[in-house]
Structures are given as structure tokens and as C-alpha cells.
Image (tube, grey):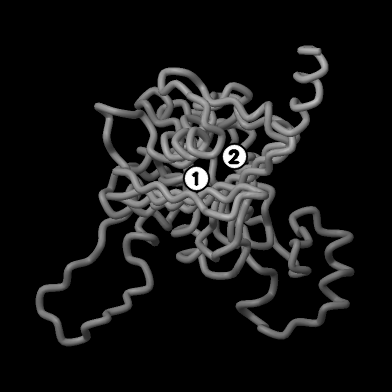
Amino acid sequence: MYQFFFFFFKPLILTYFFFFFLDRGGTFTDCLGIIDGREEEIVVKLLSQDPANYADAPIEGIRRILEKATGKAFPRDQQLTTAEFSNVSIRMGTTVATNALLERKGERHALLITKGFKDALRIGTQSRPNLFALNIQRPDVLYEDVVEVDERVTIEDYQQNPMPDKDKLLRRLESDSDLRKGVSGEIIRVLEPLNESSTRESLLGLYSKGYRSIAVCLAHSYTFQEHELEIARIAEEIGFTQISLSSQLLPMIKMTSRGASATADAYLTPVIQRYIEGFRSGFKDGLRSADTRCEFMQSDGGLANFKK
């Protein structure tokens, strides 16, 4: 009889559907739990930083919601388990990256840029929001070191003729080994191939200084990506853990914009990755269960799976 009783009620536990909505701010963390079949929502508000009581506010919020919903104890010193629930959805918005940027607590990283453009990102667009200001407060760059890369490409014929004969260029492409076709369809002339030996030496120097994150922004890489991809390959061999390529993040004209995106990615992505790994460590299965879905809100308001 007891075996029948357990077998009969076990599926009722497994059919719980939990939806967690979390907003982790700089001061407070708001947690909302919606359980399928339960009329009342469960709301928990916590301090985002309270190391004396818990290591991570969102995990603590989920723990309290689970206790209120199930009436069971989920010890704080143990990892959470979602195995007994048939469906768990976690959606979180966090200001971890924003706070790291504002407080300048991002990852220490270096910038690799085409030789001759060392100060391009520091100069920026030269925009002046306050045109007549006498004491201009210019924001500092995010990177700590710059390496000029020996390589150079240019758009073929553009300087001499902004509207070249495309058919003529395509014919030259077949016979001139220095010409390449970019991803945008433009014809690129390789003026100076990437010097792999000097690039490797420079990357080894950065690695010896303790850098593990780099941003790469080369001239015209929005259409000619080969040199940046080759730098990434060398950096991976050396052991860099974060390699942000402007050609992959923002493949568009304007080096300044691409470079700003690459340096921001190299500065903030490691911080976000460490936070996500810390959050996952609070769960026994590391959120790998097929019945568990965890998504983080992006700057555009959309949601992205934590694996991305």
C-alpha cells in the first residue's frame, strides 16, 4: 500500500512548472516566481551583495521561492537541484556588465591594431558634445596596452576612382595574387601580408605581462577578415582565453566603431562569463538538464541562452 501511495503521488511532484524572473541590480535583486497551478505569485527582494548570509543573490532568491512553493527545505549550504521538476525556466536581467563598465572593473586587456593607427581609438571621432567647453573631460580608453600589427590592406582603385569598373576589377582578380575579394564584394589589395612571426612575438610579450584578453581591430577587416582570424589562431595557440575580433563582432565600415565594440567585448565578456559560471555552480547539474532553461537579457531587450 505504501509503495502504491508513493508511486501515485510522485508524478504530482514531477509535474511542477517553475518560472523564475530575476532582476539583479547594483543594490537590490528582485525575484518573481510563477508556479503553474498556483494562483499567487511569489516575490522575494534581496540585497545584491550580502556575503555574510549568501554568496549569490539570484540563487538565494530561487532557493527561497522553492521553499515557499514546495514547503520543503533547500539548505543554503547545498547546491540547488531542479531534477524533481518537469520544467524550469530562469530569465535574468543583470547590471553586472554595466556596473563593471561604470566602475572600471572590467578585464585587463590589450588592443592589437594595424601599424600606424596606434592612437586611432584614443583620438576617436573628435566629437565635442559641448562645443565651447574650455576644460574638456575626455573618457579614457578601456584597454591598457597597444600593439601595432605589421599588415596593411586597402580597397583597390577606390582612392583613384571611387566608382571603378567592376568587371575590370574581377578580371584583374584572376591574375593578380595580391588581390582578394572581401565578404562585402569589394576587391581588396594586400599591400603588406600579416607578419606572423612578429605578431606571435608581440602576443607572447603580452601573455608574459599577464594579459589573457585581447581586442583586435585591423583596417578594412569589415570586409577582409583573414588577418584578424589568423591573429586569433595564434592567440589561441598561446593560451589567450578571450579574443575579441572586430570583424566578427561588428563587421561594418569605420574602424573607430569596430574598435570600440571589440575593446568593450574584451573588457566585459570575461566578467560576464565568470558571473554566469558562478551562477551555474549553485546548481547540481550546472543548468545542463534538458528540462531547465536559463536565459539572460541582452542590451537590446532580447533573451539569449546562457551558453551563448
Q: Nearest the camera: 306 or 124?
A: 306
Q: Which residue is mark 2?
A: 231
Q: Is residue 125 left or right of residue 12?
A: left
Against 165, residue 287 (above or below) is: above
Residue 123's x, y, as percent?
Answer: 32, 65
Q: Dot 1: within a 10 Å radius of its alpha carbon, few (fewer than 14), some, or many (20 or more) residues? A: many
Quarter the N terminus occupies: top right
Identify the residue position indicated by label 1 in the image.
149
Where is the C terminus found, in terms of image quarters?
top right
Asked which secondary structure carries label 2, the reply is helix
Q: Do the CB atoms of the residues marked 1 and 2 lie less than 8 Å apart?
A: yes
Q: Residues within 10 Å of mark 2 (few under 14, many from 20)?
A: many
Residue ID at (58%, 45%): 90
Q: Residue at x 65, y 77 (%)?
A: 158
Relative vertical location of residue 139 with respect to residue 76 in this rendering, above or below: below
Tally the marks. Answer: 2
Residue that protrudes farthest toward the left in the picture: 134
Looking at the rendered structure, the kind of residue marked 1 is Val
